[in-house]
Amino acid sequence: MGCRTSTNKTIKKAIMNYKIKIKTNTELTPSLAEAYIYRGIVLSEMLRWEEAVQDLNKAIELDPLNEQAYLVRAEIIDVIDDEAPLKDYNKCIEMNPNKVELYAARGLYFYTHNKDKEALKDFAKVLKMNPNDIDILQCRGDYYTDEGMYPEAFLDYHKVLEIKPNDACAHRCIAEVLFHMGYYEAGMKSLKTAAKLNYRFEKELDDPCWKKLCGIKD
């Protein structure tokens, strides 16, 4: 089991509270939809995915324009069917086409499901609307690195550091890119900066390719 912020006792109490609210509210209103949303979230924390989705379905039935209901359902239903969330993300964007966070959410969905072309399109949309979105810059930089597009990756990581100079992860990533581009001294400098900022090199030290890249000998 993963790290959980709520104890089982707290979760069960929350479910009971929402059950009471749902039972006592005889009017089918948007406010009742909120109760279904939050009970769905609580159920998902208990890994009761299908029950959680049922609650989100009910919330959307009660309040078809509730953006939160669609977004929460998209996150939960991804565990059951990784193709299903796209419909909810698209619906949110249809309702709020100028909301940058929705393109970011859909882009990250595409990115984590290896739909690179679609992800890059949404990332570009996000960065056009908000050029300082660190998370999207980092993700796009990671994609470029994986694809061997090191100059493009360097620009995205460098932009992250312009916005947040003490971002340890960006320093580590830009070091990797610099090594690949043949700038060993600059790469080592970035690597040392990442270490000073307490970046934990656990995975890298177990990766022979990474150790070879930065000249670490066993």
Image: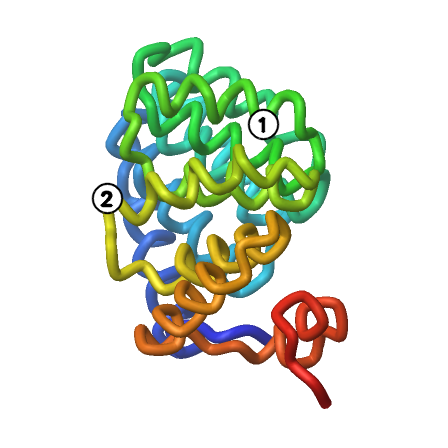
Identify residue type, mark 1. Answer: Ala
Name of the residue lying farthest toward the right: 208
Could you tell me residue 162's position as x and y percent? 25, 44
Looking at the image, residue 216 lies above or below residue 81: below
Q: Specify few, some or many for label 2: CA neighbours under 10 Å numbering under 14, 14-19, or 20 or more.
A: few
The residue that appears at 66% across and 48% down in the rendered structure is: 79
Element type at mark 2: helix
Looking at the image, residue 85 lies above or below residue 47: above
Nearer to the camera, 84 or 168: 168
For the C terminus, the quadrant is bottom right
Image check: 104 left or right of 145?
left
The residue that appears at 70% across and 85% down in the rendered structure is: 217
Quick one: label 2 or label 1, which is nearer the N terminus? 1
The residue that appears at 34% across and 13% down in the rendered structure is: 96
Image check: 160 left or right of 59?
left
Identify residue type, mark 2. Answer: Ile
Looking at the image, residue 84 lies above or below residue 52: above
Image check: 45 left or right of 14?
right
Identify residue for label 2. 163
Looking at the image, residue 206 lies above or below residue 61: below
Q: Are marks 2 and 1 in contact (CB under 8 Å)?
A: no
Q: Specify few, some or many for label 1: CA neighbours under 10 Å numbering under 14, 14-19, or 20 or more.
A: many
Q: Quadrant of residue 116?
A: top right
Identify residue for label 1. 119
Q: Nearer the viewer, mark 2 or mark 1?
A: 2
